[in-house]
Image (tube, coloured by chain):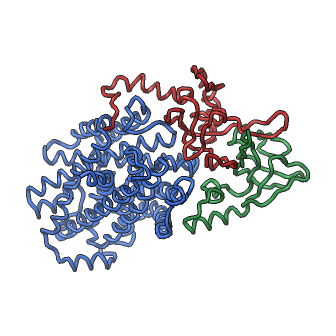
Chain colours: A red, B green, C blue
Amino acid sequence: MAHDRVLHATLDLLDRQLRDRNGVLCGNVDDVEIEIDDASGQPYVASIVTGPGALAYRLGLRRLGTWLERASTGLHDAGDAPLDDRIHVPIEFVTSIGPTIELAIHAKQLASYDTEQWWVDHVITHIPGNDSRATE
Amino acid sequence: MRLSDLLTCEVVDSDGTVVGTVNDVRLVRDGRMRVDALIVGSGGLGIRLGYIRNGVRGPWLLAKVFSRLERRARLVDAADVGSWSVAEHRLTLRVGATVQPYA
Amino acid sequence: MKRVLGVALGVLTAIGGFVDMGDLVANAETGARFDMNLAWVVVVGGIGIVLYAEMSGRVAALCGRPVFDLVRERLGPRFGLANLIASFFINFLTLTAEIAGVALALSLVSSVNYLLLIPIVAFLVWLVCWRMPFQMMERVFGLLGLCLLVFAVTLWKIGPDWNQLLSEASHPHVPGSESVFTYAYYGIALFGAAMTPYEVFFFSSGAVEDGWTKKDLGENRANVLIGFPLGVVLSLAIMASAHLVLAPRHISVEQLSQVALPVASAVGRVGLAVVIIGIFAATFGAALETALSAGYVAAQYFGWPWGKRRSPRNSARFHIVVVLTLLGAALFGITGVDPVKVTEYSIVLSAAALPLTYFPILVIANDPNYMGPDHTNGRVVNALATVYLVILLLVAVATIPLIIITKGGS
């Protein structure tokens, strides 16, 4: 699958689970950004869109979605895989397309990570035993 | 342009005849991930479930149902789309565009 | 020993999922009211859950994707969201019922009003979700749940005419005192209880938590083929003992304690003690499964990190959903809602939501891109699974009208 030349967007991309460079689950493919090549006039896939805004937009809540996307600004230092914003992952940073979609970025670079971190900082930290890895 | 917007567009040919709604987009990876063709007018469920392209063959009943549903699907070459103005939810094809059966 | 413990996931899923509040109540209720005339539904439901749980475990082992992940991927965000809301709501009702069930079991031994115990039970459930390693949880509650085998002992002690029991079960008819509609309603309740969706949510997520791979396909099969049939046997034993002990005395099951009545009368005090431990373990196990499932379905729909094997710091939203759901269920429980009624509604409603969960599993289990060329469904499994898909659809369509016609089975 990963090396197939031909893909179908709804089958192979939309709603697949995203994993970051360390294998951490970091959202789904909520939408796909298509751009038109200036020279040829032909469309191509520019990036994968992820986050609650994109999902809301896709579910038909377009205003809410657009608003949520605008609200998620601010950039983290990203090393060798910098993003333009926190909801678009350029297709060049997709390393593999299969049952999960593997990304070359770090989960922290995405806006959806902030909510996760908010709960950690405001709630989880205050509960004893939050660091236990529940494995044997 | 968002894929989700493209998936709401109606495709009409140069005479104004409706071909159908865009249900899926075929992508080809050759350097870039190019939008190669639109799959139109089927409902798209069979593709989404993998019955059309992913080699899902069973169970027999579902395979039959979905391949039947997809029989109406048409393939439109991306190069035949006149303008990609998804805001109007309508894509008009160029004169002489070919619409071929899919699957 | 390792092999024995290897089927712990299946045994816990079956004890806590198959034989939970829903089955304890539904089986005892129908045994007391319909004799053995609905026993066949338990067998049909049991085969259904074996089929689909095996598929979900196989998918999880081969591509690491749990069920709700696939639900969104194959049904799309809208149907996926509809299923998420429905499953979450049903799961919430089930969790409320299970917590009440644990509290009721504890109140039988402590003679403290069960409503006072609900907050404590909810806290304990949360503590296990927060701290206890997944495998330890599987083993402790799976093994303790085996105490429910005392229902089989009960049946054997009563010493019924086995041939007659079998012929009653194999020649079902609608009893003269009941209408076709109530018969169908309770049939659906039993079917829903047997195939409750959270069983596959939990089983497949558990397989990912246990780190199953291709090597564990045998373990998957063993889990499913030992766990769920065990659940069927227990369910039938509960039904038969209710039929033999409660029906002649015209006792209808309105409280959880009445489920234990046949054991107390046939096996005595020791039996009663054992059955209370069994009910405690089964309902507590189910409370864990439903609480975790609430987190699993939400996290898998939205793509968040999830699972007990990660520390809460690394799966914050998952743990927050679990704790909020538990809190909500405990609050709903202390309002004094009738736990038996909540149970009934949860299993009947789950029957209506079944196709949305089981359909994507069937499709993925046939997809060579996920399963590899050698592990997609065989013909026999596919044929059976198709029959069940049709049954699931029919049941789903019939459920809501039946609730209205029978006024909730009364």
Q: Position of residue B14 (x, y in %)?
A: 89, 51
Q: Is residue C381 visible?
A: yes
Say how many tags the image has. Answer: 0
Q: Is residue C401 above or below residue C88?
A: below
The residue positioned 83% from the left and 51% from the top of the image is B12
Towards the viewer: A122 or C344: A122
In percent of width and height, residue A87 lies at 61, 30
The answer to whether A113 is drawn above or below residue C399 in the figure is: above
x, y (%) of residue C58? Answer: 44, 55
**Can residue C185 be seen here?**
no
- Left or right of residue A66, residue C108 in this image: left
Q: Quadrant of residue C159?
A: bottom left
Q: Nearer the viewer, residue B99 or A61?
A: B99
Q: Residue at x 54, y 33 (%)?
A: A20
Residue C216 shown left or right of residue B46 in the figure: left
Place of residue C397 in the rendered image (x, y in percent of width and height, measured from the top left): 49, 63
Tell which residue pokes out farthest to the left in this image: C269
Where the C terminus of chain C falls, by quadrant? bottom left
